[in-house]
Image (cartoon, helix red, strand yellow):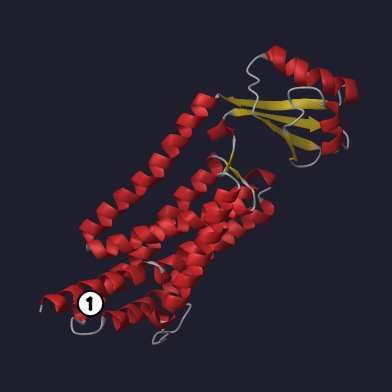
Amino acid sequence: MEFIKPGIHIDFVGKMKYAIIFSVIVAIIGIGSIIFHGGLNLGIDFAGGSIIQIKFSKNISADQIRTALKSTKLESSVIQQFGVNEFLIRTAESFHDQKLLDENVNKPLTAAFNKDYEIRRVEVVGSKVGADFQRKAIFAVILSWLAMLIYVGWRFEFRYGLGGIIALIHDVIIILGTVSILNMEFTITILAAVFFIIGFSINDTIVVLDRVRENVKLNPKRKLGDIINLSVNQTLSRTILTSLTVFLTVLALFFFGGAVIHDFALSLLVGVVFGTYSSVFISCPIVLLFENMKLSKMKRKK
């Protein structure tokens, strides 16, 4: 099945400078948001703390719960509605002790709402464990970049590997910037989305760059810019079909998956769009730039 008829010729190379300007602006906005907020809004997986999920049998508002928990250790906690009459209470306090939970949750809620509620789960992560997990998460992302750079550089050429990795870094920055701008919690599910997009993006990028490499061998005297245009147009139908299939699947998760995976699905949506975009407008310009620098050095030597 071909989404686009063969023989199409879109001048992608001619539009790459505008795409790079757009990417730089979006990346600066995202990084600026992270700096402005003092870092990402880390969930308890990384910052430590507790999550308490409570289900009420009647209509209750977050403000009513906040009033009931006044003068407890949960007074300044984040209370988020989670489905119908269900709420998540997020706090930096560690409620590993049942007595602390009774004093700060059960007693005040029972006094305010009788027994019309059920505590469905309590998750506790220590601050040291969260900090260690945070370091390991950063290390894992960087290690994945290096591993892919080594593989793509060995399997193809260094310039292709460099283009692919810069595209991945671009995608991760965009996702983290989106998380920061929307003030979403950076949780383990968002980290999972980041790893998914890294895999998705590098797969799409390799398809494009592999076609570039093949066409370079077939047309050694042709300009690299023309070869990139040819290669992207040749793989365009495959790229659109693959990305659109993934996008529609994630879109269904976003609208019908419920509150639990809402942030995860949104991160994937952003990642799929920019991952597809970066395969053409980030990785290819890096390959072209690397080639131009190489030619410039050769001319200076002569």
Does 259 sit above or below residue 18?
A: above
Percent x, y of residue 174? 51, 58
Does 171 sit above or below residue 39?
A: below
Residue 92, located in which quarter of the rendered image?
top right
Q: Which residue is drawn at 42% across and 76% down?
A: 16
Does any portion of residue 179 appear in the rendered image? no
Q: Residue at x 85, y 27 (%)?
A: 68
Does 18 sit above or below residue 88?
A: below
Amino acid, disc 1: Val
Q: SS at mark 1?
A: helix
User: In this figure, what is the number of numbered marks?
Assistant: 1
| Image quarter of the C terminus | bottom left
Percent x, y of residue 259? 69, 45
> Label 1 neighbourhood size at 10 Å, few (<14), some (14-19), many (20+)?
some
Foreground residue among 174 and 234: 174
Q: Which residue lies furthest to the top in this view?
A: 99
| Image quarter of the N terminus | bottom left
Q: Would you name the residue on which mark 1 appears?
A: 216
Q: Which residue is drawn at 23% across and 61% down?
A: 158
Percent x, y of residue 17? 43, 76
Left or right of 220 in this view: 47: right
Left or right of 6 in this view: 262: right
Percent x, y of residue 232? 37, 76
Q: Residue at x 72, y 32 (%)?
A: 77
Does any portion of residue 224 appear in the rendered image? yes
Foreground residue among 204 and 177: 177
Left or right of 38 in this view: 5: left
Left or right of 241 in this view: 301: left
Q: Residue furthest left?
A: 302
